[in-house]
Image (tube, coloured by chain):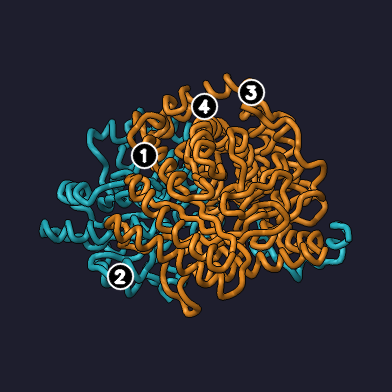
Chain colours: A cyan, B orange
């Protein structure tokens, strides 16, 4: 029987349905989404700067920010009212499934470049919600998950310190002493590299150090393994990270609370926590 | 090095599971692509077993013993164990040798006692670090990878494989930002340069030890796109972008064959149907019986032209039905039995087509790997076969064309995100320079700035 003949007999709807297409709403301009309307400022130049971030236009963002700085607009206002408003709007659209990871990454790239320009005028680093330190487990070279976490954290208003790949526990300890992070994140792809997590916990305890939580996730990492030690919480998606950090900073939750409240904190159903 | 400039198969209809133009036979008698499908079991060592050589050797031996016992208990005529080495093994090549020897000894005992045909694939980890100044081709890590391959070949492996990672820092950047230029450069150019270098070395080691020079995969790159693309409602990588990335991955994985690999190609290379269409070598694939490791949108389709059917990877632990080597070998074994029954009964073409049709329109990533479309992408690659850069673009454009045709005929439906990223990628691809040197110069400037880990010296550029 020819391939085409077989195909002609099949009703695809009884085989597979592309629900992402089926449920897609009508196209709207991003700035017209109700949540984005709430977030975007009315005042110029902040509105144009936020829109340039929303449309992922790095060059335009830098031009607008440079002009605003030349016009003596406060660099802190540019960051808080323009750049952060833009990235908050991007994050809102990402959460709604209207924007996607590349949108977030490109907007994030534009925001980070523009923040650097503002900080040059400011003469120091801008204020953030807090510092988070991120590392990939010792022995593990896979870092795309960690890189996504860094971008989500920075877009969420955190100073994110990147310790890189294949990071020994001693380096994590040094970073905790140096940065006093509100949150640590560790990623591993393999069962045999996730064993670096208890080594980090033990090394911190040996130095008498404690952090509110260490988010551990990635590849083959399991919740039951992560929860077999203190100080840790199993992280399911990279984009959950700033929400977990918010819960620590705003609501003073720690690893025990996050383990109990994970789904509520990230605001969605998470099968691993059901 | 020979480059493929024509197809080894005359038509897609010639392609069938269990059959390859150029079958290979291992030293213990097992054959790939010679008329039957071989099930594969792959199990990751449990946590804690990496602490010492003794615990690692014991763990690997237990995996082999469990799998062989279940294979006999459910009557499998043949199977292959693939041991994907963890970094601690490759970092200690003597561990690799001892683990391989221990597994080979167990498998030989089962083969002697029951006559079951068994093969052992050893896959050392690519532990090289792409970081600037790391010396991709000269570092201690590179030497350990090569030494581990030697140890595997000397100590009883039948097949040698690897998942090389050349170009990954650039392609990761491209995947997370939807930058098709980074995909062509990271996978099509850098990945191909690295794979040629590595496989020239690996194939000479395999020949020296008379072991099967298996193959490589674009796992570290195309599968990153597939994993980020996730399910239908996930929000990360566009599925059309992942489909195009997969086609570029085929232009890359073909390099291993050009440099001496004979198959079975690595299981996680979802691009393998394209490589098989071009080269005629046997392939391993994974789909519905790899749900223990990850989700994909082509669980049946990817079995259509396979020669060895795998579970990808699973923790070594207990499930209700036994240990994971037992449970998942039984799953791949029964699926291979279905395919082999269809072959014996003369119904293999029908089963191949049913496998294909279950998933063909589930997702663009599946569509481009349906064997007829895989063949078309293969044709696009060989048209520019001499130039890894141009053949990568040709593969990507053909994948885009296949998706657009299915959309026009109302068989494939795309979201706006998928539609926009496809149009944008095609638009960029059509404007890329004809001259690869010009493209490489542009990309070195661009990605040295954007990707901190990218070091052109690692590729002698």
Give the mark, 4 or 1, whose residue is nearer the N terminus: 1
Looking at marks 1 and 3 on the same chain, the residue that comes earlier in the sequence is marked by: 1
Asked if residue A261 is positioned above or below residue B340 in the image, the reply reads below
Residue B35 x/y as whole percent = 73, 56
* Residue B284 point in image, percent of width and height: 61, 53
Task: State whether residue A212 appears in this view.
Answer: yes
Q: Which part of the image, by quadrant, shows the N terminus of chain B? A: top right
Residue appearing at x 71%, y 40% in the figure: B278
Mark pair 2, 3: CA separation:
52 Å
Give the alpha-carbon distance from disc 1 to disc 2, as whole Å.
Answer: 34 Å
Residue furthest bottom in the image: B320
From the viewer's perspective, is A154 left or right of B253? Answer: left
- Circle 2 marks a residue in which chain? A
Which label was assigned to residue B443?
4
Could you say which disc has been placed on residue B433 in the image? Answer: 3
The verdict on a common chain for dots 1 and 3 is: yes
Between the C-alphas of marks 4 and 1, the distance is 30 Å
Gap between marks 2 and 4 measured at Cα: 44 Å
Which residue matches tag 1?
B144
Label 4, secondary structure: give it: helix
């Amino acid at each position: 029987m020819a391939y085409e003949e077989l195909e002609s007999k099949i009703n695809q709807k009884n085989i597979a349905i592309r629900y992402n297409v089926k449920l897609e709403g009508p196209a709207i301009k991003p700035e017209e989404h109700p949540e984005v309307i709430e977030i975007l400022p009315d005042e110029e130049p902040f509105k144009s700067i936020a829109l340039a971030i929303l449309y992922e236009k790095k060059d335009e963002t830098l031009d607008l920010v440079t002009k605003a700085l030349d016009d003596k607009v406060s660099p802190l206002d540019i960051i808080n009212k323009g750049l952060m408003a833009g990235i908050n709007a991007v994050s809102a659209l990402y959460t709604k499934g209207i924007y996607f990871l590349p949108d977030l990454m490109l907007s994030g790239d534009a925001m980070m470049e523009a923040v650097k320009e503002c900080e040059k005028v400011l003469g120091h680093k801008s204020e953030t919600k807090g510092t988070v330190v991120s590392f990939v487990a010792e022995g593990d070279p896979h870092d795309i998950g960690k890189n996504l976490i860094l971008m989500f954290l920075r877009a969420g208003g955190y100073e994110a310190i990147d310790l890189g790949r294949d990071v020994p526990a001693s380096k994590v300890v040094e970073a905790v002493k140096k940065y006093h992070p509100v949150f640590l994140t560790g990623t591993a792809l393999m069962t045999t590299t996730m064993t670096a997590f208890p080594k980090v916990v033990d090394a911190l305890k040996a130095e008498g150090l404690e952090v509110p939580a260490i988010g551990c996730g990635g590849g083959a990492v399991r919740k039951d393994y992560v929860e077999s030690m203190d100080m840790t919480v199993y992280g399911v998606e990279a984009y959950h990270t700033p929400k977990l950090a918010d819960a620590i900073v705003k609501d003073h939750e720690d690893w025990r609370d996050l383990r109990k409240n994970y789904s509520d904190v990230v605001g969605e159903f998470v099968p691993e926590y059901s | 090095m020979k480059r493929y400039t024509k197809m080894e198969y005359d038509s897609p209809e010639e392609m069938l599971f269990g059959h390859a133009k150029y079958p290979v036979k291992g030293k213990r008698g097992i054959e790939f692509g010679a008329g039957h499908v071989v099930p594969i079991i792959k199990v990751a060592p449990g946590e804690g077993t990496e602490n010492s050589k003794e615990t690692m050797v014991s763990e690997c031996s237990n995996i082999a013993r469990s799998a062989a016992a279940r294979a006999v208990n459910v009557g499998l005529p043949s199977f292959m164990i693939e041991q994907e080495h963890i970094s601690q093994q490759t970092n200690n090549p003597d561990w690799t040798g001892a683990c391989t020897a221990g597994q080979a000894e167990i498998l030989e005992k089962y083969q002697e006692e029951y006559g079951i045909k068994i093969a052992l694939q050893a896959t050392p980890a690519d532990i090289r670090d792409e970081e600037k100044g790391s010396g991709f081709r000269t570092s201690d890590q590179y030497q350990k990878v090569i030494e581990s391959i030697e140890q595997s070949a000397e100590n009883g492996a039948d097949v040698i494989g690897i998942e090389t990672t050349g170009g990954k820092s650039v392609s990761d950047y491209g995947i997370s930002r939807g930058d098709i230029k980074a995909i062509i450069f990271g996978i099509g150019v850098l990945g191909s340069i690295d794979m040629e270098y590595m496989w020239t070395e690996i194939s000479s080691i395999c020949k020296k030890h008379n072991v099967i020079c298996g193959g490589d995969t674009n796992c570290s790159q195309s599968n990153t796109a597939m994993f980020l693309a996730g399910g239908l409602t996930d929000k990360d990588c566009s599925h059309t972008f992942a489909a195009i990335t997969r086609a570029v991955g085929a232009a890359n994985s073909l390099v291993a064959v050009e440099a001496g690999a004979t198959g079975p190609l690595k299981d996680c290379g979802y691009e393998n149907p394209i490589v098989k269409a071009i080269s005629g070598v046997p392939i391993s694939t994974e789909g519905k019986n790899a749900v223990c490791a990850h989700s994909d949108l082509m669980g049946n389709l990817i079995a259509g032209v396979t020669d060895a059917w795998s579970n990808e990877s699973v923790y070594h632990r207990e499930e209700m039905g036994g240990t994971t080597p037992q449970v998942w070998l039984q799953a791949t074994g029964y699926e291979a039995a279905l395919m082999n029954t269809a072959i014996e009964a003369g119904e293999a073409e029908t089963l191949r087509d049913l496998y294909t049709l279950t998933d063909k329109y589930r997702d663009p990533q599946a569509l481009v790997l349906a064997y007829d479309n895989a063949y078309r992408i293969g044709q696009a690659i060989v048209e520019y076969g001499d130039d890894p850069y141009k053949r990568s673009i040709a593969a990507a454009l053909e994948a885009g064309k296949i998706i657009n045709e299915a959309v026009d005929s109302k068989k494939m439906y795309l979201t706006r995100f998928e539609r926009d990223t496809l149009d944008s990628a095609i638009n960029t691809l059509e404007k890329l320079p004809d001259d690869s040197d010009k493209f490489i110069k542009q990309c070195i400037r661009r990605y040295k700035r954007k990707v901190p880990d990218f070091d052109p010296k690692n590729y002698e550029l």
